[in-house]
Amino acid sequence: MSSLTETFTFREAREDDCGLILYFIKELAAYEHMSSDVVATEELLREWLFEKKKAEVLFACADGREVGFALFFHNFSTFLGRAGIYLEDLYILPEYRGKGYGKATLKKLAQIAVSRGCGRLEWSCLDWNQPSIDFYLSLGAKPLDDWTAYRAAGDTLTDLSKD
């Protein structure tokens, strides 16, 4: 593995980055074979990330260029009695993979979690994504074998909300 460039930095997303955030979301969706699921728009991202402040975005930058992003938000552990950070998305451009950018981004997120007093950093990974699974295992992350994720969305969510 080669090392990071000397000018590798992180920066928090700003409101005028909504187009760039959407670009990374679409790149991730294409990688995950889920492009048709993306309905996010710059306007929705502006509203939910910057007006309602429901999540945060951190860019990984090399030589002044954004080469990856992490979108995360706080969750809460009743057992720990404190917040954690849930990493919704992490994406590094293909030409920058295997160079330490992903590891550095997760390390930065761990530093943010620790500095905020969070009890854990969690994320999900698609079962077929063996390169990512191997990467996460190499960092010491542990899969939660006894848990299954559930989701209510779209019409199911609307139906569930009704009396």
Image (tube, rainbow, N blue to C red):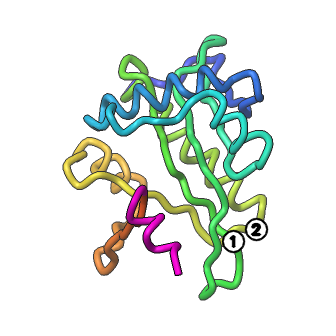
The relative height of residue 123 versus residue 62 in the rendered view (above or below) is below
Which is closer to the viewer, label 2 or label 1? 1
- Magenta stretch holds residue 160: yes
For disc 2, the neighbor class at 10 Å (few under 14, some 14 to 19, many from 20) is: few
**Residue at position x 45%, y 74% from top?**
160
For disc 1, the neighbor class at 10 Å (few under 14, some 14 to 19, many from 20) is: some
Q: Residue furthest bottom?
A: 79
Lower position in the chain sequence, tag 2 or tag 1:
1
Asked whether the beta carbons under mark 2 and mark 1 sit within 8 Å of each other, the answer is yes
At which x and y percent is residue 36?
A: 32, 33
Which disc, if any, is residue 117?
Answer: 2
**Residue at position x 56%, y 30% from top?**
41
Q: What SS does tag 2 mark?
A: loop
Q: Nearer the viewer, residue 162 or 113?
A: 162
Q: Nearer the viewer, residue 162 or 70?
A: 162
At which x and y percent is residue 131?
A: 26, 42
Left or right of 109, for residue 163:
left
Q: What SS does tag 1 mark?
A: strand
Which disc, if any, is residue 153?
Answer: none
The amino acid type of the residue labelled 1 equals: Ala
State the count of labels: 2
Question: What is the CA distance from the residue labelled 2 to the residue labelled 1?
Answer: 8 Å
Left or right of 149, for residue 54:
right
Magenta highlight range: 154-163
- Magenta stretch holds residue 63: no
**Residue at position x 52%, y 28% from top?**
68
The amino acid type of the residue labelled 2 equals: Gly
Q: Nearer the viewer, residue 124 or 16?
A: 16
* Majority secondary structure of magenta residues: helix
At which x and y percent is residue 103?
A: 49, 41
At which x and y percent is residue 122?
A: 51, 62
Can you identify the residue that label 1 sits on?
Answer: 83
